[in-house]
Amino acid sequence: MAFKITNWVTGHPKRIIVLWIGLWCLSLFFAVRLPGTLTTGGFNNPRSPSAHAQRVIAEDFPHASPNTVVALVRRRTETVANPAFHTAVNRLAWYLQHQPAVAAVSTYYTTHATALVGDHGHATILAIRLRATSGNAAQNLVPALKRTIARHIGPRFQWWVTGGPALNESLNIATLHGVSRAEQIAFPLLLLILLLVLGTIGAALVPLLLAGMVLPITMAVAYAIARQSPLNVLLTDAISMIGLGVIVDYAVFIISRYRQERMRYETPVAIQRALTTSGRAVFFSGLTVMVSLLALLLPRLMILTSIAVGGALVVGWAVLASWTLLPALLMVLGPFIERGRLPWYRPSPEAGSRGWTRWATGIMRRPWRILLPGIVLLSLFMVPVTQLHMQVPVASARALPATSSARQGLVQLERHFPYLDLFPIDVVVQSHGTPMASPQNLRQVADMVRVLQRLSTVARVQGPTTWQPQWSVADYVRVYRHWPSLPPLEQQQASAWLSPRHPQVALIAVDSTQSANSLRTHQLVDRIRQTLSRMPLQGLTVFVGGQTAVGYDFDQAVTQSFPLMIVVVLGVSGLLLAWTFRSLILPLQALVLNGLVTLASLGVLVAVFQQGLWGLLPSHHTVNSVTPVVLFGLSMDYEVFIVSRIREKHEAGATTEHSIIAGVSETSRLVTGAAVIMIAVFVAFATVPIGVVQQLGIGLATAIFLDAVIVRTTLVPAVMRLLGERNWWGRRWWNQMSGDSHHNGNTALCPENR
């Protein structure tokens, strides 16, 4: 099968290139539309209690819906009592209210709520409730609101726009700009590294050309998927970050082997030999990486699904391009690939180097002296993992760059409006038939309020029985009974806590003394649920929601999905590696060592982001719960590439020890160069001023570094030396299963060996 593919590719190179160019041109039209279809949501579990609470709130308590924008206006020389201040705010509210996207605008002057005044009277806020039915639609309305405020507030006022939709809009903009800047950093770095690794300008440009073709095509396919199913903006980060690394790495592996073979064979044969050796390793390593990424689909969480879709798509297209477009280009370019040779590059038909040969020979003589220090070093990196605390950033501007106006506005709110909590913990109470305004239900609600108020880190509890502190439960029962005859202001206060549309629904809001994204507020969500579950409530069901609860439930869903994802990744990856290596022992070794690298990388993340590099950097106190599930698998291609070369030598008749020496000496320089390429890409994306992307970039760069420096060129040959011929245990069984009767499974496919 492999020979038929390579024979067809080398026989029709121009046709293949034209097909790819046509596909690329078509994809540009759709790829540019991808950002407009993506959302900043997805850090939630739609099957959780908090998701149910959010749906009830959106329907019955629209004033508490997350689709509310907050405009903060301030004037240093005047207070809200000043007529000019009053006139300016009312004028702005009038213009905002007449925007088609705005459902209602609440100000201090219409509600007389003192919580809407801050900074000793020099600042006030306007709560702008949007008509949007989704977070994605709401964030798209924010730019128009900003233009309206800028046009009508006047130059003497300072103003900021914040709240959930504004934070999401800023995150979307920062992500797009960050990805663009990261790519601008990555491409020059990649060109420089490729020149050092491949030694000629012609060879260095080919991987970048492949990346320029594959990335837009992948984004066009992702656009088609995003039209049918909501996906997060991190999809573009996954495509660009993972795609740039694997496309260039795979191209480097195949080009290097092709150039080595071309010194002994004609171009078509050299390409066929490169594909049936390095190309085979690329195929199986790509499958392994795709399996690791597709395991992120198991929790059924949008943010992980987005990364899985983006990563798996771009890896799949990278493998396809490596087996079709790349060999077609090599056929057409011919000797042109050697143009622009740099002074230090000395082509040789032998891929091995003396330095790596001496290194591998030293490992063969003293494997334990290499193995034990390597494991100890990895173990030291793992130590901080014991302190790992995973938490997704929600209800927080920490993920945004400091220059974001939405982040600055949230900081101003926290500083000058201490009694206003934009992100309370919401408790939705639903009765089983009787109205919530009945005496029995209101007494139970009052009991809940009293119990919750006694919890630590609770600043304030508001609900159906709190808006007039001097009233008893009986007073509230009488008032709610005559709801239609209440004055407008009291009707507004009552409808904030009892649903006018569904009398069986009530809302309780719990404000924390800590920020909504803090660890203690996340713990408060759990304490509220446990406390309410112990209360003897009759005829009532309680759901805890709010942005903090949404994040808490997301973290729980990720944590609970870990065992299943690990089992699936290990099981399927093990089978693929066994198929690749024709061995049952080598896959176990690869998975164990990759697990050590993942844990060590997590340890570095904890040390850098959670602990602030032992106090040297600002601490984030947590590691986002997305990063750990992405780390495993992206460095597996080096294992496949090195061991495939060792197997190739062993199948050719060399002893296991000599096969290891030859395989390591011939691949280590290339693996090191490929690792530098990956690290350069991930470090470039670590400059994106988005917390999740930064942690992904640093985590993946660390995993690649540890894998290439400590594991693949050190621990792998040491372990294989100790195992000896046991490395190949199960080979006959796999050959019988696959019907492979050739002794040399790689080179037998080439025409001169048939």
Image: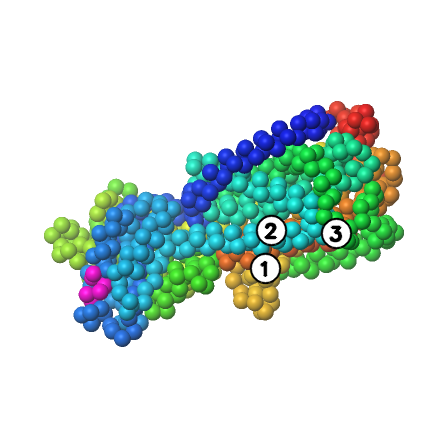
Q: Amino acid at mark 2?
A: Phe
Residue numbers of the magenta segment? 86-91
What percent of the width, then of the height, locates residue 159? 32, 64
Q: Quadrant of residue 212?
A: top right
Q: Which residue is mark 2?
A: 187
Which residue is found at the position 44% from the left and 41% from the top?
33
Q: Is residue 233 left or right of residue 410?
A: right
Task: Say which residue appears at 78% left-offset and 37% top-offset.
Answer: 262
Which residue is under mark 3? 342
The residue that appears at 47% across and 47% down in the rendered structure is 233
- Report how many numbered discs are placed on residues in the image: 3
N-terminal label among 3 and 2: 2
Asked which secondary structure carries label 3, the reply is loop
Q: Residues within 10 Å of mark 1 (few under 14, many from 20)?
A: many
| Percent of width and height locating residue 36 | 42, 44
Which dot, 3 or 2, sits closer to the camera? 3
The part of the image, by quadrant, that contains residue 79 is: bottom left
Q: Position of residue 707 (x, y in %)?
A: 70, 51
